[in-house]
Each structure stands twice: as C-alpha cells, then as structure tokens.
C-alpha cells in the first residue's frame, strides 16, 4: 500500500461524556485501510501534536477498518481481521493526572475491560485481565484483546486490538506470532455463549461495533487518567487485581517454560511473583509474555 492510501478516510471532532459531568474533546480519525494505526498516530503527532499540548483537544483516536501491518508486543505481529477493532489513542503526557508511566498499562487494561462490560454486560463475568493488559475469556483462557503502549516526545499512545466479529484462526496465529501464540476468541462468540446464562430478562444483547468500543474505551481511559479525574493509583491496582484471570499462567519472557505464581501488585502496578525455587521477585510488565 502506498502512503496516499493511508490518507484516505475521514476526521471529526466529538465530545465524549465523562464521569462527574465532564466532557472530553476527541479528534477521531478513521481510515478504511492502513498499515498501522500506531504509525498513523505518530504522523499525526508530528503534524498536529500542538492541538493536544495546548489543550484544544484532550485526545486523538485513530481507527482503521483494515490494518495490514499491526504490531503486537516485542517483535510479534497483531492479526488484524476485518470487522475487529484496530485503533490507537493518543494523549499528551503533561495532561495526565500525575500517573507514573509504569501504571498506565494497568490503567489501559482496566479502561478496556470497563468499556466492554458497559457495552456487553452479559459477558462481564468472563471478561478478565491477564498481566499486564490483555483481556481474556476466563472460561477458555483465550485472548480477546491486547494492547501496545508507547511513550515518546511528550505523548503517550495506546494501540488496541479487540477481536469483535472474528478471531484469527490457529494457522494464522502460528504463521504471524510463532509457536508460543495463544489461541484467540472474539466478542461475538462470547455474546452468543453468555447470553444464554447471564442475560437479563427482556434485555437484548448485541455485538457492539468497532467504533462503539473505541469511543467507550477512549472515554474510560480519560476517566481514569485525566488531571481532573478523582481516581487514585491504588484504585486501579485493586480493580485490576480483582478482575485478574486466575486460570491464566504467568511466565517470564526469559524463562517461557517456567510458570510463576502471582502474589499481588505493588503500589506502582508491578507484579510480585513466586518462583519455583520459593523466592519472590517483582516483574516489570515489559518482561512478560
């Protein structure tokens, strides 16, 4: 794809309602097709980052219907399937509410889970968090959503992929992510399965669109991190731990075959684990698979 194709699409300004009667001004950029929303976000920052730094906008949201070169953690690729969410949210670091950068992966995970639970409450019981910021189906351990976070040049960005309409098949995951790839699920599958047991009488549940998920996630993230937010770091730590996936093992990247036992989170959002030799250690989120 050439650069001109990345410039196609639309842009609009929206006001998102936040907690406490507040509003957030968000620039929404939508691409029908792009290589990477994270690359598009970097280009937007270079051209128009002053709009965030000056406060004319609180965040920018870049979404793509199709993404051909999505990135996952490390050197992995993110499998982008049509009908799913591929987006990137960018904010100015100076407008964050004093959050330590090591806490932001947990903030993003909590925000995405809140957004999904609000849109599909019938699935709330099975939407769990895997360290540091994956959303998984607790019944199967399969991955529903993942994130890639970056901080540079005064801006903080969250790349988000959510399997909404379809999950990448096993062969595609093996080809793009290698033999350690985790199996995936999609929101449509969870809605179909969970509505039979957790559906409220008289309430119809539908699968939300990618844009609905993206906007709700953006609002939830700003609710947690904005300077005017009343949320404390310990609140996020407690919420993440409450909704962690007990069924998902934790491995250190340097020892992928050695399971670790989670003991708890520090005040800074780092994970304390017990090693097989009985020693406890703290893992920074970048070290985990």
Image (cartoon, rainbow, N blue to C red):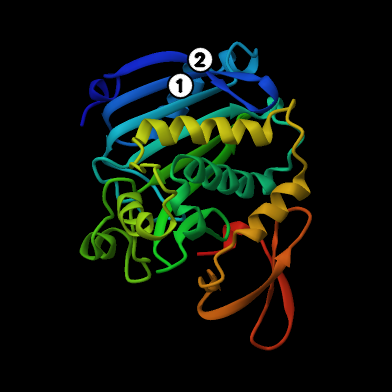
Q: The residue tagged with tag 1: helix, strand or loop?
A: helix
Query: Residue 226's x, y, as percent?
Result: 69, 29
Q: Relative to 253, is 120 above or below?
A: above
Q: In this view, does 276 lie above or below 265?
A: below
* Left or right position of 161 against 266: left
In the shown orientation, is residue 136 left or right of residue 99? left
Q: Name the residue under label 2.
A: 48
Q: Name the mark on residue 126.
A: none
Q: Give the residue displayed 58% in from the left and 22% down from the top.
A: 17
Residue at screen point 72% across, 55% down = 238
Q: Residue 288 appears at what percent x and percent y? A: 55, 64
The image quadrant that residue 1 belongs to is top left
67 sits to left or right of 141: left
Using the image, determine if residue 93 lies above or below residue 277: above
- Residue for badge 1: 44
Classify 10 Å Cα crowding around label 1: few (below 14), some (14-19), many (20 and above). Answer: some
Q: Position of residue 243 (x, y in %)?
A: 60, 59
Are circles 2 and 1 on residues that touch, CB within 8 Å? yes
Q: Where is residue 180 drawn, in percent x and y?
A: 38, 70
Mark 2 surroundings within 10 Å by alpha-carbon count, few (fewer than 14), some (14 through 19), many (20 or more): few
In the current view of this chain or complex, which residue is farthest to the bottom?
277
Q: Residue at x 34, y 65 (%)?
A: 183
């Amino acid at each position: 794809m050439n650069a001109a194709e990345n410039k196609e699409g639309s842009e609009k300004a929206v006001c998102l309602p936040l907690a406490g009667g507040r509003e957030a001004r968000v620039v929404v950029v939508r691409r029908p097709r792009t290589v990477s929303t994270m690359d598009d976000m970097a280009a937007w920052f270079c051209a128009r980052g002053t709009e965030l730094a000056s406060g004319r906008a609180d965040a920018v949201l870049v979404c793509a219907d199709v993404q051909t070169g999505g990135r996952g953690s490390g050197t992995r690729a993110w499998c982008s399937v049509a009908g799913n969410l591929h987006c990137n949210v960018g904010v100015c670091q100076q407008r964050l509410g004093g959050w330590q950068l090591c806490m932001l992966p947990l903030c993003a995970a909590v925000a995405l889970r809140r957004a999904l639970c609000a849109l599909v409450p019938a699935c709330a019981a099975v939407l769990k968090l895997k360290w540091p910021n994956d959303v998984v189906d607790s019944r199967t351990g399969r991955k529903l959503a993942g994130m890639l976070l970056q901080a540079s040049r005064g801006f903080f960005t969250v790349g988000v992929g959510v399997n909404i309409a379809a999950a990448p098949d096993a062969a595609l995951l093996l080809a793009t992510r290698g033999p350690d790839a985790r199996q995936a699920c999609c929101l449509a599958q969870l809605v179909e399965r969970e509505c039979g047991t957790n559906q409220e009488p008289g309430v119809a549940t539908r699968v939300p669109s990618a844009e609905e998920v993206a906007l709700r996630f953006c609002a939830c993230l700003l609710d947690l991190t904005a300077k005017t937010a009343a949320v404390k770091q310990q609140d996020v730590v407690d919420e993440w731990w409450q909704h962690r996936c007990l069924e998902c093992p934790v491995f250190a990247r340097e020892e992928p075959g050695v399971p670790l036992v989670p003991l708890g989170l520090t005040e800074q959002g780092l994970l304390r684990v017990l090693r097989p030799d009985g020693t406890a250690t703290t893992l920074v989120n970048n070290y985990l698979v």
